[in-house]
Amino acid sequence: MQNQELKKGEIVIYKAKGGPKLDVRLEKDTVWLTQKQMAILFNKGVPTINEHIKNIYKEGELERNSTIRKFRIVQSEGGRKVERNMDFYSLDVIISVGYRVKSKQGTQFRIWATRTLKEHLIKGYTINKKRLLQVQDSLKNLQEIIVLLQEKSKHELLAGQEREILNLLSSYAKTLTLLEQYDKEKIPIVKKAKGEFVLRYDEAKEVIDRIKKELIAKKEASDLFGQENAGKLKGILGSILQTFEGKELYPSLEEKAAHLLYFIIKDHPFVDGNKRIASFLFVYFLDRNNFLYKDSGEKKINDNALTALALLVAVSNTNEKEKLTKLITNLLSV
């Protein structure tokens, strides 16, 4: 007999040793056969099968409504394909008919069907349990982000940023909705991006120098802006590319960008301007990887949202790193 991975409404092949081969319909946690298929299975005529089924219902052994249903099938008639609504009978009916015709094939089919249904139920339970855990994890993440944003919004540095914080929360919740829709097979999941551009130290320094000149010309920065502390920037740029046992710690473009922003703000590689430099390099890194904009043409994270994110990172505790980088990563994935 042949075992196959099962899905609801799937056709499963039954083939007993020395017996017939049947296309068995699996639906509603049971198996279904037509009278013609039962006639083949039990090696009896269709009229005999029909008579036994009539008696099963007449004697009240089984209830008709719960053990019979119609399926639309395609069959060949006179050299052409024709769709017909056919009566199919559940395993309870099949077993009952098998007992009445005293068929050895009926016993074999009952054993096969019971095992097949058990496998189907176990697989269905495993899939549903996995989905439940994924939903629970998503809700837990959302709850943690809500608590984090509520706490940090009270900080004096974030005064006036309430609207942007709400927008961040709304965008983050949208990513969880998309994940839930994917889990229910409603939309295709957007795979994490793989960027080709790597931000090297010398290029980063050139970008910072250009920004510094522009800001000084506007009288928005001093000479201390962008002065590096003991080679810290080089270490940060190296850290987002680090590997462990041949695998990148931050394999996706979104994760690299999120950690670039986070590390520059939290590790203070510069005497002055860490938040602004982190934001500029974050945007530059995404732009060079053609990942700054959505298909609609708007930025994945607009300037106001980026300002709020930078401030959130700045006032966060070190044990909140994973939550914040996950927030940024998901915002980039929408």
Image (tube, rainbow, N blue to C red):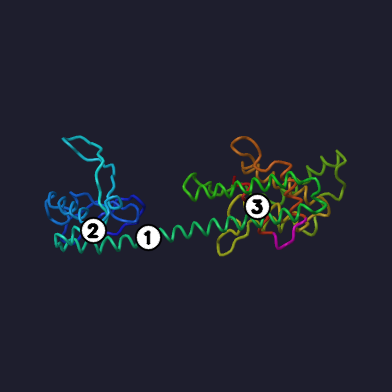
Q: Quadrant of residue 104?
A: bottom left
Disc 2 versus disc 1: nearer the observer: 2
Magenta-drawn segment: 315-320
Disc 3 versus disc 2: nearer the observer: 2
Residue drawn at point x = 53 percent, y = 46 percent = 190
The residue type indicated by label 2 comes to Glu
Disc 3 versus disc 1: nearer the observer: 1
The residue type indicated by label 1 comes to Leu
Q: Quadrant of the N terminus?
A: bottom left
Residue drawn at point x = 24 percent, y = 43 percent = 86
Along the polypeptide, which appears first: circle 3 or circle 1? Answer: 1
Mark 3, residue position: 327
Is residue 319 highlighted in magenta? Answer: yes
How far apart are the alpha carbons under marks 2 and 1? Answer: 26 Å
Mark 2, residue position: 61
Q: Is residue 291 toward the left or the right of residue 43 in the image?
A: right
How far apart are the alpha carbons under marks 3 and 2? Answer: 59 Å
Residue 127 screen position, x and y as percent: 44, 58
The residue type indicated by label 3 comes to Leu
Front position in the image: 254 or 151: 151
Front position in the image: 300 or 52: 52
Along the polypeptide, which appears first: circle 2 or circle 1? Answer: 2
Q: How many neighbours does mark 1 have within 10 angstroms: few (below 14), some (14-19), or many (20 or more)?
A: some
Secondary structure beneath dot 3 equals helix
Secondary structure beneath dot 1 equals helix
Along the polypeptide, which appears first: circle 3 or circle 2? Answer: 2
